[in-house]
Image (cartoon, coloured by chain):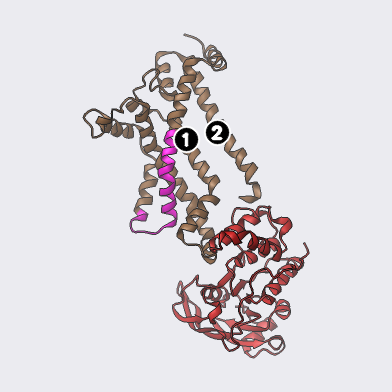
């Protein structure tokens, strides 16, 4: 059994050498999670924006539901998607179980409420500030929606990042619906879990480093972009 | 910065209302949180030039402007505007909310919201920037502007829809004398171009410099509407006399 320091050295060597297995796993993780975030944004942003701007019966209950869904247990989502996509399930005919598509579906279900809730919160707060001014300028509700989406763009990027963070870090659901099949559905988190259980710490640690670095780089990029485009007094 | 008078009339002058077509506030009433904010307010304002609305805090001045702008519905009564002003009312709040965009972005968006045809927007934009003497600041994020610059932007932004009646709620309340002078010069240019202006102010000096008449409000009622300069020297109501002496605070 290698020592902890040996494992770290080997992990860094794997990253530095561009180990093909590690690269494949990282790229698949990014493909699955980024696709899921795009799909979740397509659902979550309009839903969150509508909840912030429009008043309709049942809106309050929907807000509570969306907020509650932020805490969805991934294994439960995985189980539901698994049952839906299994051969005897309603969507079994699609043959998606144990494919990246199934993982994307599961992650989309997990991430969409996060993006919707954060979008609603950001836009609702801005609406409090903007509402009277926009009405005075002749804006209707659709105009207001468009104005808020543009002016809250940095908050929305933060919401997308939060969603991406959740997707990249998620393990339970993708393990259930993806099956952690080597070269097919093995992503960073499931690989880390597997390699750790097998005692192959260097690959697990290497993937862990990459996961941390991705999170750091993404957050730094957004902060940098925000500082560059917006400036401290433009918030 | 110093104000520069633009060389062109920056927006279409409004057709002058008939001299007898006054702005009427009739039996207005509004209760909020159990308090009678506007209490049977009735008055008539001159349809041209600059009218001032004065009164202690809580007199109902800001709410009155919001009612006139159609942002707040009164419980009773109505505001009757001369025909050329109907549907053409702009308002600027005491603390203007500027969008998280550049100065130019704020005006462009206001023109879009005002449904100004795309082909006319660039010209109107240049006119509004020139009117507010804001050209050097056009690309600056609006929220980095000084108080006076921000207020001038808010005022010209309210002109995007080419209002015939412009309501200003204490536009110089937080400004230093130089910035106040810039805003007052802008307001005078707007009034000279034919837009009726109603301005809420606590400043007798400002009222003396700008207004043709003063409406004095107290406890949600209009105590008097008196032409200038008579209001400052000999107000008709006891409330206005007490206010100007500083003995009425609320």
Question: Numbered disc 1: what chain?
Answer: A
Residue A26 appears left or right of B144: left
Residue at (63% x, 44% y) in the render:
A229
Check the rendered structure and report the hue given to chain A. brown
Residue A86 appears left or right of B209: left
Residue A165 to residue A230: above or below: above
Task: Tell whether position A143 is magenta.
Answer: no
Residue A57 image offset from top left, x and y in percent: 33, 58
Q: Quadrant of residue B63?
A: bottom right
Closer-to-camera residue (B25/B217)? B25
- Please tell me whether mark 2 sits on a helix, a strand or a loop: helix
- Please tell me whether mark 1 sits on a helix, a strand or a loop: helix
At label 1, counting other C-alpha atoms closer than 10 Å, the crowd grade (few under 14, some 14-19, many 20 or more) is many
- Asked whether the viewer can see residue A75, the reply is yes
Residue A72 to residue B193: above or below: above
**Whether label 2 touches label 1, CB < 8 Å:** yes
Q: What chain is colored red? A: B
Residue at (39% x, 28% y) in the render:
A171
Closer-to-camera residue (B129/B147)? B129
Residue B58 image offset from top left, x and y in percent: 57, 75
Could you tell me how far apart the alpha carbons at marks 2 and 1 are, in whole angstroms? 9 Å
User: Which of disc 1 and disc 2 is earlier in sequence?
Assistant: 1
User: What residue range appears in magenta?
Assistant: A35-60
Residue at (45% x, 74% y) in the render:
B34
Q: Which residue is mark 1?
A: A164
Give the number of callouts. 2
- Asked whether the viewer can see residue B198, the reply is no
Q: Which residue is mark 2?
A: A218
Q: Please, which residue is most extreme toward the top here?
A: A1
């Amino acid at each position: 059994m290698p020592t902890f320091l040996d494992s770290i050295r080997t992990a860094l060597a794997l990253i530095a050498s561009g180990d093909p297995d590690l690269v494949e796993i990282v790229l698949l993780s990014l493909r699955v999670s980024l696709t899921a975030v795009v799909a979740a944004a397509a659902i979550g942003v309009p839903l969150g924006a509508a909840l912030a701007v429009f008043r309709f019966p049942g809106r309050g209950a929907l807000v509570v539901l969306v907020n509650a869904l932020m805490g969805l247990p991934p294994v439960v989502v995985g189980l539901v998607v698994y049952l839906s996509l299994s051969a005897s399930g309603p969507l079994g005919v699609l043959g998606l179980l144990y494919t990246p598509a199934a993982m994307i579906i599961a992650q989309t279900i997990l991430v969409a409420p996060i993006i919707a809730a954060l979008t609603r919160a950001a836009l609702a707060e801005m609406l409090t500030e903007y509402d009277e001014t926009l009405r005075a300028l002749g804006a209707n509700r659709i105009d207001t929606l468009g104005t808020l989406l543009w002016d809250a763009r940095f908050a929305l990027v933060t919401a997308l990042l939060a969603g991406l963070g959740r997707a990249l870090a998620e393990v339970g659901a993708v393990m259930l619906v993806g099956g952690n099949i080597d070269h097919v559905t093995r992503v960073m988190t499931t690989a880390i879990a597997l390699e750790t259980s097998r005692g192959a710490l260097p690959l697990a640690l290497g993937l862990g480093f990459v996961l941390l670095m991705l999170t750091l780089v993404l957050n730094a990029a957004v902060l940098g972009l925000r500082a560059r485009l917006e400036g401290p007094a433009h918030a | 910065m110093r104000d520069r008078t633009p060389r062109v009339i920056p927006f279409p002058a409004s057709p002058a209302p008939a001299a007898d077509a006054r702005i009427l506030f009739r039996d207005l009433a509004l209760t909020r949180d159990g308090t009678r904010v506007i209490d049977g307010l009735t008055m008539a304002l001159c349809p041209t030039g600059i009218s001032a609305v004065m009164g202690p805090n809580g007199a109902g001045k800001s709410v009155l402007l919001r009612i006139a702008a159609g942002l707040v519905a009164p419980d009773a009564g109505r505001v009757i505007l001369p025909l050329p002003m109907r549907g053409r009312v702009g308002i600027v709040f005491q603390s203007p909310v500027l969008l998280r965009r550049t100065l130019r972005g704020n005006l462009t968006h206001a023109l879009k919201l005002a449904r100004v045809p795309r082909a006319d927007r660039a010209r109107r934009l240049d006119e509004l920037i020139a009117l507010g003497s804001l050209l050097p600041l056009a690309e600056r994020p609006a929220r980095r502007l000084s108080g006076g610059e921000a207020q001038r932007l808010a005022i010209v932004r309210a002109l995007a829809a080419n209002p015939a009646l412009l309501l200003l709620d204490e536009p110089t309340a937080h400004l230093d004398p130089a910035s106040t002078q810039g805003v007052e010069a802008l307001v005078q240019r707007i009034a000279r171009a034919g837009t009726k202006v109603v301005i809420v102010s606590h400043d007798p000096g400002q009222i003396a410099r700008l207004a043709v008449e003063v409406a004095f409000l107290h406890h949600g009622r209009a105590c008097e509407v008196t032409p200038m300069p008579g209001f400052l020297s000999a107000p008709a109501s006891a409330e206005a006399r007490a206010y100007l002496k500083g003995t009425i605070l609320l």
